[in-house]
Image: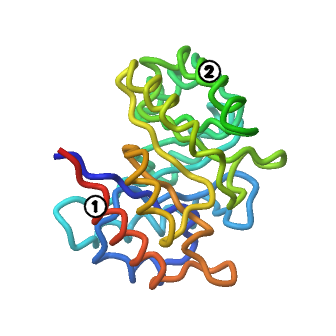
Amino acid sequence: MRETEVKICGLQSVEVLKSMVHLNIDYIGFVFAESKRRVDPEQAAELIKVLGDWKTDRRPRSVGVFVNPDIEQLQEVMDMAQLDVIQLHGQESPVFCASVKERLGTSVIKALPVQGGPDEAVAGTQRLDPYGGRVDAFLLDTYDPRYGGGSGRTFAWEAIPAYHERAGMHGIPLFIAGGLTPDNAGALISAYDPEGLDVSSGVETDGVKDIAKITAFVERVKRHGTTA
């Protein structure tokens, strides 16, 4: 049985993170790129310590979100905050992704922005091919001209099957982000069955992570997202 994985991104508060320890969450994301949710390495290190308190048989994996970093910047963060996964949201090349895996010993998620209607979006699936064997997951997110992602808006979901098939050709799981909420997560899983969902603003109230919304999101994903 495959269970849809959940990534909650943009955590900044130790107190909020402690309130989540009873939930079945697979990844916790910390944003190091330009964002109102940005954390510094010292904050991330403090937050990562909380993951050891998780009341499940496996703690969530820690994910650092970066846009066009150099390897030195990543190493500086890793020296202080031991991340399990590096998520790259810029124009990072396949060679750079492979270098991150080799030099830092982390998994790598490569985010790809999706824009336009379904036909235009599907035309971009060939972008995945050079990353085959060099990343551990793909993340589709709605294109944002400033940050590349994190817009809080959905993209043309009709494009998901073409990306899912292409990723599957390389044996690489596909995560979906962009405008997800507790209200639409179940519909997305039922229609497209991706390997994982990534949410940030959709589980916030007035820009602050809301434990009630996080709980509802996790429960709905896990309820809808178990397949043979």
Give the percent coordinates (x, y) of residue 210: 53, 82
- Which residue is identified by label 1? 59
Q: Quadrant of residue 23?
A: bottom left
Which is more toward the observer, 150 or 48? Answer: 150
Name the mark on residue 202. Answer: none
Q: How many marks?
A: 2
Query: Element under label 2?
Result: helix
Q: Earlier in the sequence, mark 2 or mark 1?
A: 1
Measuring 29% from the left and 67% from the top, which residue is drawn there? 24
Residue 137 quadrant:
top left
Residue 22 on image: x %, y %: 28, 77
Residue 176 in picture, x, y percent from top left = 51, 47
**Crowd around label 1: few <14 · some 14–19 · many ≥20 (10 Å):** some
- Quarter of the image for the C terminus: give it: top left
Give the Cα separation between the discs numbered 2 and 1: 32 Å
Q: In the rendered view, tell whether residue 195 sits above or below residue 14.
A: above
Question: Which residue position is annotated with label 2?
Answer: 127
Q: Give 208 or 96, whichever is nearer the viewer.
A: 208
Q: Residues within 10 Å of mark 2 (few under 14, many from 20)?
A: few
User: Does 224 sit above or below residue 166?
Assistant: below
For the residue pair 220 and 99, the one nearer the viewer reads as 220
Q: Secondary structure at mark 1?
A: loop
State the residue at coordinates (48%, 51%): 63
Q: What amino acid type is highlighted by mark number 2?
A: Arg
